[in-house]
Amino acid sequence: MKKQHASRRTFIKDSVTSAAGLLAMSTLSTPKVDASEPVVNTRREETMNQAPRIRFSVIGINHDHIHGQIGAVVRGGGQLVAFYAKEPDLAAAFAKRYPDVKQARSQQEILDDRSIQLVVSAGIPVDRAPLGIAVMQHGKDYMADKPGITTLAQLAEVRRVQKATKRIYSIMYSERFENKATVRAGELVKAGAIGKVLQTTGLGPHRLNNVSGGVRPSWFYDRKYFGGIICDIASHQFDQFLFFTGSTEASVVASQVGNVHHPQYPLFEDFGDVMLRGNGGMGYIRVDWFTPNGLSTWGDGRLTIIGTDGFLEIRKNCDLGRSKAGNNLYLTDQKETTYFDCNNDPLPYGKLLVDDVLNRTETAMTQHHCFLATELALQAQQQAQKINLKK
């Protein structure tokens, strides 16, 4: 048994090193650690020094996530050449931040430009799917901020047009694609570090006033614009559930939503949770808008992945009580607990998406996965029981 265990650990180390290129071979044989004195394992993020591989543009900048989306495509070799926003104040701020990027006179100007291969959007959520449909119909690929689709009717039309045009409709599930510890966890799971994955628990707490001046736009508080709390912020957790369990089919066991503490916003939802069952494992999701001001970041987002031989815990944005830094990953197996500082890890999504635009492949994320994560979120939102707490 000892020989088998040693062979398995060697396989894990070799597999992760091959996948990432720079993972230290000693990380999976480090003595047991506690949270106060973690063993730090780092690797440098790759940089790209090359001529632009594609030309892309932005339409819709109603959420600051647009900057992360742009950053991912630029890292992948994309050149941002134009943008359009119908709101003068948002357009002015964007132009100041990106002074070398052309401001288009209309959305149609970008859609009609045949030199543009990809359109990126963080518009008001309800507008993202109609824009994506127009983008695909104009022969371009599309990457939306989450939620990329807010109703099941929108999803049906997006699927129809995507199938007909064969264009890419990608949704930036940034809690996986833009979180380095989550990327590393994917490599460890693929290498067999915790055996077969059984269940994921994804927690997505958010701070309501996490914007300049603490003021959100009016659409933010109306479900018809953002789709509901499960559709919106829990879309990240559905993506991670499918990815880490390897599920290609799944169903919603139960879900609930409520507005339990913000009566001044009657069309808002501040809490939601979901139970899931897939053909590769089970899942639980909890999201809320109750992060207190005393936390160093907008939310103590966490993901726990339970396997037959161990578990992984990702502390995405901070390591509560230990560090304000994010990208923290803990691996506990049959022998020890290992801590990974993933802050210098690469983020592959942008490069893979650009590869897919050029090669007509699905390496960043399959279209089936993209749509299934959204479908589950929309189904959970639609069938959610309403929470009514007694005062």
Image (spheres, rainbow, N blue to C red):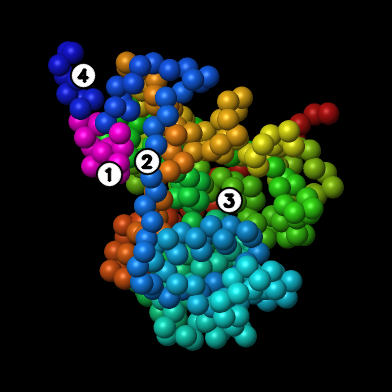
Q: Answer yes or no: do the residues labelled 4 and 1 have beta carbons within 8 Å?
A: no
Determine which residue is flagged by label 3.
231
Determine which residue is flagged by label 4.
5
| Front of the two marks 3 and 4 | 4
Determine which residue is flagged by label 2.
43
Between residue 106 and residue 45, name the one nearer to us: 45
Q: Is residue 342 left or right of residue 203?
A: left
**Cα distance, mark 4 to mark 1?**
24 Å
Q: Answer yes or no: do the residues labelled 2 and 1 have beta carbons within 8 Å?
A: yes
Mark found first going from the N terminus, 3 or 1: 1
Determine which residue is flagged by label 1.
21
Q: Secondary structure at mark 4?
A: helix
Three-letter code, disc 2:
Arg
**Cα distance, mark 3 to mark 4?**
42 Å
Q: Position of residue 382 (x, y in %)?
A: 59, 49
Which residues are drawn in magenta?
Answer: 11-24
Question: Where on the picture, by quarter, is residue 339?
Answer: top left
Q: Does the stretch in magenta take in 22?
A: yes
Above-or-below relation of 164 to 327: below
Above-or-below relation of 67 to 263: below
Residue at x 43%, y 17% (from the top left corner): 33
Q: Is residue 234 left or right of residue 32?
A: right
